[in-house]
Amino acid sequence: MRLVIPGRLPSLNDMIDAARGNKYEAARQKKESTELVMWSAKQQRLPQMNYIDLTITWYEKNKKRDKDNIQAGVKFILDGLVSAGVIPNDTWRYVGDILHRVRVDRTEPRIEVEIEEPAS
């Protein structure tokens, strides 16, 4: 199944800058990003799962952000999936492999998360 998250999530540099500047800004940024993922998952009616593998494709509007900084947003994705009730927690017990791809889409930046529940 696929989860589509509109726009972009904060990069690692964005998170570090927010934390250095104002602890309340960092908390606000985390809350807003996690809620964006949670509401996207609820709107797209993702079912509950016990164990998942993820393939995340990050569609950026340009190549300005480094790939490693972009991928730090996986924190918000996992926390949002937990908040939406898709997975019980984001520990090793519930989350397997996480693969990343980074692409450019100048007209529609987004994150597409392929979620698989592997057979036991």
Image (cartoon, grey):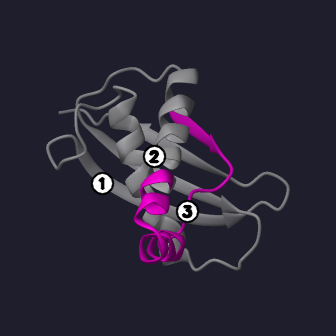
Q: Is residue 24 left or right of residue 105?
A: left
Whether residue 116 is visible, yes or no, is: no
Q: Which residue is mark 1?
A: 97
Label placed on residue 10: 3
Residue 1, position as x, y percentages in the image? 49, 31
Q: Which mark is residue 42?
A: none
Q: Residue at x 50, y 23 (%)?
A: 42
Q: Amino acid at mark 3?
A: Pro
Magenta span has 23? yes
Quarter occupied by residue 117: top left
Q: CA distance from mark 1 to mark 3?
A: 22 Å
In magenta segment, residue 22: yes
The Cα–Cα distance between marks 1 and 2, rounded to whole angstroms, is: 25 Å
| Residue at the spot of label 2 | 31
Q: Residues within 10 Å of mark 2 (few under 14, many from 20)?
A: some
The boundaries of the magenta stretch are 1-28
Q: Name the residue nearer the viewer: 26 or 89.
A: 26
Residue at (41%, 59%) from the top-left corner? 99
Query: Which one is in front in this view, the residue at disc 1 or the one at disc 2?
Result: 2
